[in-house]
Structure formats: structure tokens, C-alpha cells
Image: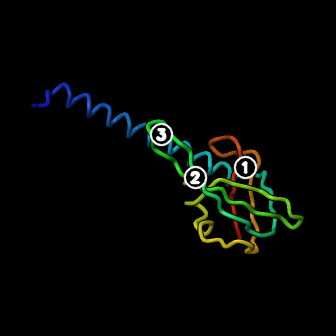
Amino acid sequence: MPLSSKKIFEFVILAVMGTALYIGVTLYRDSNYEKAVQSPNQIHHCGKFLERTKVVHELFGGSDQVEYLYTFADELGVSYSFTGSRQVIKHLPRLTSLQPKQPICFQYTPTAQDRNGLFATLTKIE
């Protein structure tokens, strides 16, 4: 069954549009994360790393999206959870190798939230 030039053209247009959409969303998220890192409204705590929790989001079409939550506790035992988005992991690669109960200082900005609007954005660990 030969492909018509019209079908090939439609496929190329869809591929270009999909690529442009992906690049646009990625640049938008990168820009938002950079704004969070540069925000003057940063909150700093020292305490310990508690756990990394795997969260699976079921997507349309039967595929799953895996996301990780990183939970810390401050000196008073108050827990803080942050998502490990691609932007956060790229900026803070050490995040993936933290061990439970490991002492750590962490910084976040409450004015910038993750893409779901649920968690503040983690901007620094030391």
C-alpha cells in the first residue's frame, strides 16, 4: 500500500508540531525553575532527609508517568516534601543519591510550586 504525498505531508506537519510543543513546554518549565532559584523569597532549613517516594500517575492510553517525592524534616521535626521534576534533578543531581536520616540543609521558595501546584520548589541542598 503506497503512501500518498498528502499522508507524508500530514505526518511531517504533525511531527513538527509535536516537537515544537515539547520544546515549548520544556523551555517554559526551565524558565519557571530558574525564576524559583533566583527568587529572593527563599526559606532555608537544616535537618535530615527522610525518604524518596515513588508516585505513579496513570495517563490516558495506559501509559504511566513516574514521579518522585523527596521528604525532609527540619530541626523541629516538621516535614517538607518536594517533587523531583526534571528541572530539579538537573539542578540538584545529588538529590537522587541521598540516604534516609542523612543530615542535610535544604532551601526552597514557597512562591513557586511544582507543575501540579501542590508542592513548593526545592532550590538548593547542602
Secondary element at tag 2: strand
Q: Is residue 11 left or right of residue 35?
A: left
Q: Residue at x 61, y 69 (%)?
A: 94
Q: Is residue 11 left or right of residue 125?
A: left
Give the number of the mark in front: 3 or 2. Answer: 2
- Whichever of callouts 3 and 2 sits on the residue coming sooner in the sequence is 3
What residue sits right under mark 3 in the picture? 24
Q: Position of residue 68 (x, y in %)?
A: 61, 56
Secondary element at tag 3: helix
The type of residue carrying mark 1 is: Ala
Q: Where 65 falls versus 90 (above or below)?
A: above
Q: Which of the numbered marks, if any, corresponds to residue 67? A: 2
Q: Residue at x 68, y 50 (%)?
A: 36
- Whichever of callouts 3 and 1 sits on the residue coming sooner in the sequence is 3
What residue sits right under mark 1 in the picture? 120
Q: Residues within 10 Å of mark 3 (few under 14, many from 20)?
A: few
**The image quarter in which residue 29 lies:** top right
